[in-house]
Amino acid sequence: MKRLIIQTGPPEVLTYKTFGEMFFEEGGCSYEDTAVIDVYRGETLEPPAGYSSAIITGSPAMVTDHLEWSERTAAWISDAVKIGLPLLGVCYGHQLMSYALGGSVDYLAGGAEIGTLDIYLNNADSPLLYGVPKVFKANLVHSQTVTRLPEGALSAARSERDPNQIIIYNDTAFSLQFHPEYSGSVMRDYIEVYKSEDPENAGKYGKLSAEDTPESRDILRRFIGSY
């Protein structure tokens, strides 16, 4: 069986790469053992039992828009968790997993969180996080966030503004608000996009950090290496 990458949209940095390509590059996936399905284009997922694991990507869409493809993917996620399929949600995928399992999603108070920021681990015990420093850097760009955890889920990390940066749902299902697949160059491109879309506040974007984040990338690689 193949690993699955569920693409929930294209990166806003359209001249760069697809989310899937970034997961291949930063996560060490191989094309031979990985299927990529563009659910946002209407492509159909096979039943969860047909895959060895799944990663749900980021998206420029919003979970609260309840788009038809997104609702179908949420139902698929719910079924996948019931059979114990290893799952990793990232950004939109993080929020969609939480929503699919009974949590709530809404806009982050104070506006988008963007740049290379500090992530603080809580006292969570998970093999996915073994060896990760108590404080590490990660790349973020998101306007929505998980505002209420699903029943039984655990928040394993936070940033200064978002208390739910890593969620552990069970022994095989996890999600990350940050982007472990983003290099520093991708983060810089995103900052330029935001600067161009908000020229009146361009100065504040110039102060944002954009770095490679090996500790967050290692979390992704640990998931891929384990499942």
Image (cartoon, rainbow, N blue to C red):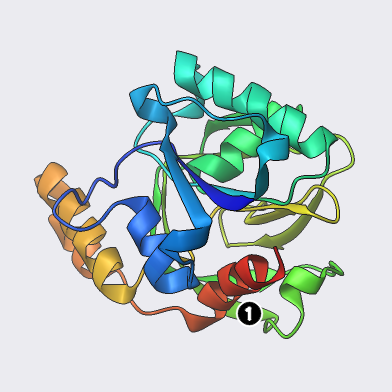
Q: How would you rate the neighbour count of disc 1 (Cα within 10 Å): few for under 14, some for 14-19, many for 20 or more?
A: some
Q: Quadrant of the C terminus?
A: bottom right
Give the camera-side residue of 2 and 139: 2
Residue at (39%, 21%) from the top-left corner?
Answer: 42
**Residue 154 percent coordinates (x, y):** 82, 51
**Residue 78 percent coordinates (x, y):** 73, 29
Q: Does residue 60 appear in this view?
A: yes
**27 shown above or below 75:** below
Q: Amino acid at mark 1?
A: Val
Give the camera-side residue of 95 and 78: 78
**Image position of 53 (left or right of 136):** right
Give the camera-side residue of 134 and 128: 128
Which residue is labeled 1 in the image? 135
Residue at (71%, 69%) from the top-left corner?
Answer: 226
Quadrant for residue 183, please give it.
Answer: bottom left
Quadrant for residue 12, please give it.
Answer: top left
**61 shown above or below 7:** above
Give the camera-side residue of 32 and 39: 32
**82 shown above or below 21:** above
**203 shown above or below 148:** below
**Residue 142 percent coordinates (x, y):** 42, 46
Residue at (39%, 46%) from the top-left corner?
Answer: 112
Q: Does residue 147 appear in this view?
A: no
Quadrant for residue 111, please give it.
Answer: top left
**Residue 116 percent coordinates (x, y):** 40, 70
Residue at (56%, 54%) from the top-left corner?
Answer: 161
